[in-house]
Image: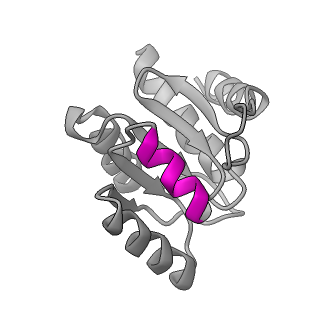
Amino acid sequence: MKKVFVFLVVLSIAAVSFADNCPIAKFYKVDSGIYRGAAPGEKGMQHLKDKGIKAIIDLRTGKASVLKEKRLAEKLAIRYINIPLNPIYGLPEQKQVEMFLKITKDPKNRPVFIHCHNGVHRTGRMVAVYLKDALE
């Protein structure tokens, strides 16, 4: 099972593509209603709104960036959820995984956009969690 998880992480990182004229780095559709990428910024937030994104899962830990994005999301009527993951060490805790899966499975949150700062490590981990759960 560990090999499958590692494979999914590598696959999710390698599968990053850039959408035409998309202001969000590493923006990619993972599955129906699931998108991933880097931190969106102001132009990216408007892009998410225009794409019909209903919820954002921000995996960053920084208070200033989290607060700024939360305010932008609220202005655009996008649900904002912060699940802070350590940017360097280990895997998410079980309660974080459960919360993440509950949010991504809830139709009222879809389509959902998942991101960290660069849209690679933490985002890749959680996309792998989503894909593993979807395959079971």
Identified at 52% across, 59% down, the residue is 59
Q: Which quadrant, please, contains the N terminus?
A: top right
Indicate the quadrant where residue 19 lies: top right
Instruction: Please provide percent x and percent y for residue 35.
Output: 52, 35
Magenta portion: prevailing SS class = helix
Nearest the viewer among 128 and 47 is 47
The residue positioned 34% from the left and 38% from the top of the image is: 104
> Residue 65 appears at what percent x and percent y?
56, 77
- Give the residues drawn in magenta, as a range: 42-50
Instruction: Check the picture and name the quadrant holding the C terminus.
Output: top left
In the image, 125: left or right of 20?
left
Residue reaching furthest to the right:
14
Q: Visible in this render: residue 102?
A: yes
Picture colour scheme:
one colour
Residue 7 spot, x, y in % from top left: 71, 24
Of residues 73 and 86, the one nearer the viewer is 73
- Return the residue nearer the eye: 2 or 117: 117
Q: Is residue 113 above or below residue 42?
A: above
Q: Is residue 16 left or right of residue 132?
A: right
Q: Describe residue 14's horizontal placement relative to residue 86 as left or right.
A: right
- Up-down: is 83 above or below 48? below
Outermost residue toward the top in this view: 135
Write the residue at 61% across / 66% down.
86
Judge whether residue 102 is colored magenta: no
